[in-house]
Image (tube, rainbow, N blue to C red):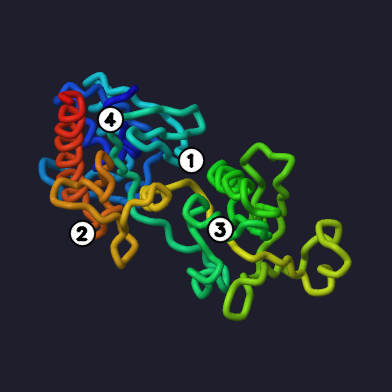
Amino acid sequence: MEKVIIIGAGPAGISAALYAVRGNLDPLVINNGIGALEKAEKIENYYGLEHPLSGQELYDTGIAQTKALGVRMLDAQVLGVGGFDTFVVKTTEGEFETQSLILATGSKRAAPKIPGVKEFEGKGVSYCAICDAFFYRGKDVAVLGNGDFAMHEAKELSNTASTVTIYTNGEEPEFTPEENISVNTMKIQSVEGDDLVSGIRLAPDVQAQEMSAEQQANNFCPADGVFIAMGIAGSTEIARQMGAELTEKGNIKVNENMETTIPGLYAAGDCTGGLLQVAKAVYEGAQAGINAGKYVRSLNKK
């Protein structure tokens, strides 16, 4: 079992790893890509930089620094986190059990720009299969996404829903198909309904063979619920799955020690909201790494 797993290898995740390894925790960092740093052309408002660095250069430097200290790095996509007394991190490279967990994958994803998604949030549009699957027992549901995260959410829903269909919104599927889960690769025009979601309307160029004769008339696919699982699972999605409390703005709620409302679960960086700057991410990562160490040592004393 791991003592601490850090999800994310940006400034917050790397900072957490540096303090965790100095605390003799032998952390495992799960790296799912560069994240928001990729968009930074020049960074010059951070201490110690004689010359501006690009986000990619800063990211590469952080990875190299961490590896030089012997920190283990796993390139994988996180699909979800389970467990009770300890955490089980489910990834595309297997499952890993840990005593403490630090979420540091950046800010929450924006809702897809599909008409109806934003309007029906909380009225049939959901971002967490584990949280809301219970409400769709015996019903027909849709999952929007084309990666492993979408398939993970679809499989969670298939345990309770009558039917589950993944809509890739015109993208090629990047997951391995499952027999009991349908896949529709057509472009989505909108999510529709009255007071609650009633279904998905596909773009006019939809291929006839993917629809029934009745549905061909208006390109409408009935669904009682629509679950958003585009891209990969970020910190906010993981926290929501686990039942950690979020703020009114949808960021992960933490205390001064960067601990969430779940003991042993910490968050740092853009996912906690506030100032979206490298300096803040590094500070919060340090706090999370230090306090995760304190938490693990308290467990091992019992």
Instruction: Please give the residue where the numbered disc 4 appears in the rendered image.
Output: 4
7 relative to 20 in the view: left or right: right
What is the quadrant of the C terminus in the image? top left
Instruction: Please give the residue where the numbered disc 1 appears in the rendered image.
Output: 79
Q: Are marks 1 and 2 in contact (CB under 8 Å)?
A: no
Instruction: State the residue at coordinates (33%, 41%).
Output: 56
Q: Earlier in the sequence, mark 3 or mark 1?
A: 1
Secondary element type, mark 4: strand
Find residue 200 and report its image quarter: bottom right
Instruction: Please give the residue where the numbered disc 2 appears in the rendered image.
Output: 275
Instruction: Please give the residue where the numbered disc 3 appears in the rendered image.
Output: 227
- The three-letter amino acid code for the residue at tag 4 is Val
Where is residue 287 drawn, in percent x and y? Answer: 15, 41
2 relative to 172 in the view: left or right: left
**Residues at marks 2 and 3, CA–CA distance in whole angstroms:** 29 Å
Q: Are marks 2 and 3 in contact (CB under 8 Å)?
A: no
